[in-house]
Amino acid sequence: MMARTLFCPRCFCERNASPIEYDDRFEIHGYTLDVRIHAYECSACGEELADPDDPDLMRPVHEAYRLASGTLAPDEVRAIRERTGLSQVGFATILGMSPATVHAFEHGRPLNIKEDNLIRLAGLPGAARFLLALRGHLLRPGQRPARMPPMLKRPADD
Ligand SMILES: [Zn+2]
């Protein structure tokens, strides 16, 4: 990374900013993670500034957590949900989660092992259909999937 001009929220103006790297230790869901952080530093006040090309300072930390824990990535959570045909609200409702939680999972919040297990199990063939039969009454009409999620496929169906 090269020095560049960035907006510093502490100086409240554009400042020269130099690239910095350091190792930091994070605790996520019981995992201790040592992660190299890449950021910038305001040359006037020393404030740490995120890289505008990669503004989420926690992204490498969350990636390290997913690698260590073997938990789902945001796009994998989204892919599982989309296979059920349910919206974030509908999916959250039949799983007994808040819609904000499902939204956060699809935008980078790390899942703990229990949450990861639940989402994976919901993605198994027949699981969403089963949950809809059990919890579908909690959905409003607009939250029902346009098509029913796939049934568990029996060998005889082949
Ligand atoms: Zn500054």
Image: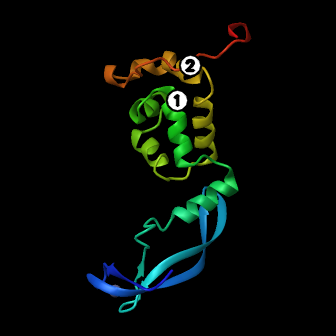
Mark 1: C-beta under 8 Å from nearest atom of ligand 1: no
Q: Do the residues labelled 1 and 2 touch (CB within 8 Å)?
A: yes
User: Disc 1 and disc 2: Cα gap in Å?
Assistant: 9 Å
Three-letter code for the amino acid on which mark 2 is drawn: Pro
Q: Quadrant of the C terminus?
A: top right
**Disc number at residue 94?**
none
In the image: residue 58, left or right of residue 17: right
Q: Residue at x 26, y 83 (%)?
A: 13
Please determine whether, in this image, residue 130 is positioned above or below residue 25: above
**In the depicted structure, whether residue 100 falls above or below residue 24:** above
- Image coordinates for residue 21, horizontal then vertical, percent: 56, 81
Instruction: Please say if 44 is above or below 113.
Output: below
Name the residue rendered at 57%, 64% in the picture. 61
Q: In this view, does 133 lie above or below 42?
A: above
Determine which quarter of the picture holds residue 87.
Answer: top left
Kind of residue indicated by mark 1:
Arg
For disc 1, the marked residue is 83
Total count of labels: 2
Q: Return the residue found at the far left.
A: 12
Q: Which colour scheme is used?
A: rainbow
Tell me the element at label 2.
Answer: loop
Q: Nearer the viewer, residue 109 or 156?
A: 156
Residue hosting label 2: 150
Q: In this view, does 140 lie to the left or right of 147?
A: left
In percent of width and height, residue 127 lies at 59, 23
